[in-house]
Image: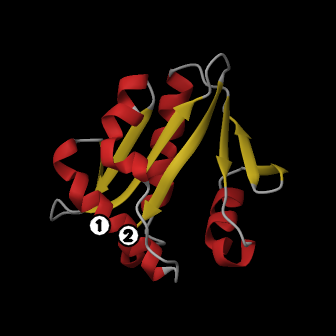
């Protein structure tokens, strides 16, 4: 597995992976509109977005973040891992990559908004807790980046 900065040539494969990941969780797969234009919604604004690729050059995960203007905070977005690749370190590697870049840009607080009902998103809640995030409001979690 390798983590790369977003590259538009992987866009369709990434979108397909996200839809598959949602389907595997029993959710109605719908498209997140921001994924249609990652450059315009993330990169052109100084935010970040990465892809995880397998040894066949296929997208198996993604993550992005958006800086909250006028603060030293950012929100994580679209951390997805292909169902067959879960529990292999892909999500952790993506999260570490995003956090490292946030630190580099002077971001001191990483935030994430998790889905509801909690029972359907149990993997997300457990994942972020494992990585040091704490709930500060219902469905909102944060971690200080040192």
Quadrant in which the C terminus is drawn: top right
41 relative to 121, above or below: above
Q: Mark 1 and 2 residues: CB-CB less than 8 Å, in contact?
A: yes
Whole-percent x, y for residue 31 in the image: 40, 61
Question: Mark 1: few, some, or many residues within 10 Å (few <14, many ≥20)?
Answer: some
Q: Residues within 10 Å of mark 2 (few under 14, many from 20)?
A: some
Horizontal and vertical percent position of residue 143: 71, 41
Q: Which residue is mark 2?
A: 19
Task: Look at 61% across and 21% down and name the residue there.
Answer: 69
How many numbered marks appear? 2
**Outermost residue to the top:** 70
Circle 2 — which element?
helix
The picture places residue 63, in percent across and down from the top left corner, at: 44, 49
Q: Residue at x 45, y 52 (%)?
A: 93
The kind of secondary structure element at disc 1 is helix
- Which residue is painted at 42% across and 72% down in the image? 21
* Disc 1 from disc 2: Cα separation: 5 Å
Residue 1 seen from this side = no
Q: Quadrant of residue 110?
A: top right
Q: Is residue 33 visible?
A: yes
Q: Is residue 89 left or right of residue 121?
A: left
- The answer to whether 39 appears left or right of 112 in the picture is left
Residue positioned 65% across, 77% down in the render? 120
Q: Is residue 11 above or below residue 118?
A: above
61 or 41, nearer to the observer: 41
Residue that label 1 marks: 16
Q: Is residue 23 left or right of residue 3?
A: right
């Amino acid at each position: 597995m390798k983590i790369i900065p977003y590259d538009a040539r992987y866009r369709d494969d990434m979108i397909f992976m996200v839809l598959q990941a949602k389907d595997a969780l029993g959710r109605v797969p719908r498209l997140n509109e921001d994924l249609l234009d990652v450059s315009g919604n993330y990169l052109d604004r100084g935010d970040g977005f990465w892809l995880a690729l397998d040894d066949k050059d296929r997208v198996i995960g993604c993550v992005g973040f958006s800086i909250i203007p006028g603060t030293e905070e950012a929100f994580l977005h679209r951390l997805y891992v292909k169902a067959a690749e879960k529990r292999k370190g892909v999500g952790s590697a993506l999260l570490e990559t995003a956090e490292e870049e946030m630190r580099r840009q002077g971001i001191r607080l990483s935030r994430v908004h998790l889905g509801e009902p909690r029972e359907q998103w149990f993997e997300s809640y457990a994942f972020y807790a494992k990585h040091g995030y704490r709930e500060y409001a219902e469905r909102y979690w944060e971690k200080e980046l040192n």
